[in-house]
Amino acid sequence: MVQPRGRERELSILRVVLELLGENGYERLTIDAVAARARTSKATIYSRWPDKATLVAAALNARSGDLPRLLPAGSDLREDLASLVALFVQFAENESLTVFMSVLIAAENEPVLAEAFHGTALEPRRQDCSHIVARAIAAGEAAADSSGEELFELVMGKVLVRYVIERGRLSAADQAAFIERVLIPALDRPAPS
């Protein structure tokens, strides 16, 4: 069990990891840089985290409790979708895309990092999408075969293309148009015969 003072020190080190990730990305992050900025020894870091991937995974997990959450259910599907898209946009505009992309790329070869990334960045949003679709189906606002996974992919894809590839934004008007032109029709399609 980590003592309160030890836990404070651990959280301080993990905050430094997130700062350096934001500045340099995963590939250029070093234990030396973390130790120097956190004013601790490499031995202290390695006594708790055996390698860089485990250290970054711990930092992502520690940070996950501070991330915004989806608002409670709206009065209808459009309100739920507006809250969902706004949440994805909030992440894109307030979180470091350098961190996101560098960790996503590194996670391909680092299973501990992939697990943390999926658990903190992706899975909660997938669950949000599944809850919205389930409520919409129950309310008769979406086709019975609508998929939370497809909703997740549509919204995540739109946000990644706009913010990462195009380096643009999704204004409130863009969000509303995306909901009306893409998401509502995708959820209200007739089941294939």
Image (cartoon, rainbow, N blue to C red):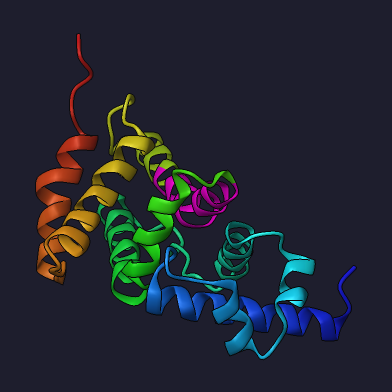
Give the left or right position of residue 143, taking residue 27 as reference: left
Q: Residue at x 23, y 48 (%)?
A: 157
Give the left or right position of residue 85, taking residue 109 as reference: left
Q: Is the C terminus in the top left, top right, bottom left or bottom right quadrant?
A: top left
Q: Residue at x 79, y 78 (%)?
A: 7
Q: Quadrant of residue 187?
A: top left
Give coordinates of residue 50: x percent, y percent: 71, 59
Q: Residue at x 42, y 38 (%)?
A: 134
The answer to whether 48 is drawn above or below residue 35 in the figure is above
Numbered label tally: 0
**Span highlighted in magenta in the image:** 112-129
Q: Is the N terminus in the top left, top right, bottom left or bottom right quadrant?
A: bottom right
The answer to whether 158 is drawn above or below residue 166 in the figure is above
Q: Which of 136 and 114 is in front in this view?
A: 114
The question of residue 124 being in magenta is answered with yes
Give coordinates of residue 159: x percent, y percent: 23, 57
Q: In which quarter of the image is residue 171?
A: bottom left
The question of residue 36 being in magenta is answered with no
| Outermost residue toward the top in this view | 193
Majority SS type along the magenta span = helix
